[in-house]
Image: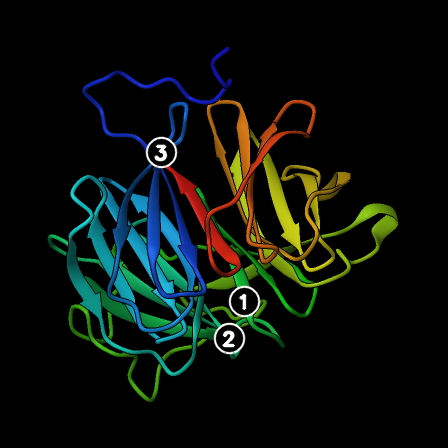
Amino acid sequence: MAHPLLRAPSDVRVAITAGSADGTIRAWSIQPPHQEKGILRGHTGVVYALLVLQGKLISGASDRCIRVWDARSFVCEHVLLELSATILSVAFASGHLFAGCQDGTLAVWRRGAGAGFEVLCAVPAHKGGIYATLGVEEQVITGAADSMLQVWSAPADGTSATGGAGGALPSTLPSGTAGGGGAPVRATAMLLGQDGEDPGGGVYALAHADGFVYSGHQGAFIRFWSLAERTCMKTVAAHDSYVCGVFVIAGKLLTASSDKTWAVWDRATLTRTRAYEGHDGGVYAIVGH
């Protein structure tokens, strides 16, 4: 019997793409039997972050570079210059690209023509590495090693940039904190755990669908949140090690872990339907497209 994952038209290339500790990005067919379709090479460090954006695949790694790939041909089209720290997460909201860095900085670019991005600002966002960054309409949610989940306002689409397309972050940038009136990015809320507690354990991954947020944690579990109520609805044990990636597609939740596996879950019940192996190292990011 066919595995209950996404069914796509035969003329559309649809894949599950996972980044790994060996510096590669591997693409798998999303239809059974989930065969490997290609290997993307270019990063010289661990690939921690993946994002599908309008036919492009954006990746971030410990080599401090962001690469922009064609999501169908898997050809690298653009490389953003090095940041000052490892790139742990990437997201897109309100016409802007966000990168969560190991030093707790949230870097922001405005999307320019073609595959180019113009530097906007850097925000001191967390007291630990920002392992998860999620764009939800006009908001950005960040999760970090300090166990906190923060909600930020995204810049207006016309906000002025401070650097050239693809440029490195300048040494001096406008920065914002909670309540910073003139900053282009401001903290507006915090997601709280059950009984008002903080999430507990580093937050390594975030995904969003239908007004809910899914988070992957250092404690090898996943959590299900109501974005409107800012509260945790459910906690489920997921892997044998850190849950480093989560992604929602076609009623399924995909998770990736440092235990070298990725898994498929029924999103409605949060029950695991199957786990997959194939990587030589931990699987630190996963997307379906």
The label nearer to you, 2 versus 3, is 3
Horizontal relation, residue 22 to residue 68: left or right: right
Q: Residue 51 in the image: state x and y as whole percent.
A: 36, 49
Horizontal relation, residue 112 to residue 16: left or right: left
- Mark positioned earlier in the residue sequence (1 or 2): 2
Quarter of the figure that contains the C terminus: top left
> CB atoms at circles 1 and 2 under 8 Å apart?
yes
Label 2 sits on what residue type?
Answer: Gln
Visible residue check, residue 165? yes
User: In the rendering, which numbered label is found on residue 186?
Assistant: none
Label 3 sits on what residue type?
Answer: Gln
State whether residue 273 is above or below residue 234.
Answer: above
Visible residue check, residue 138? no
Q: Which residue in the protein does label 1 denote? A: 130
Q: Looking at the picture, tell me which residue is in the foreground, 288 or 42.
A: 42
- Mark positioned earlier in the residue sequence (1 or 3): 3
Q: Which residue in the protein does label 3 denote? A: 35
Question: What SS does tag 3 mark?
Answer: loop
- Mark positioned earlier in the residue sequence (2 or 3): 3
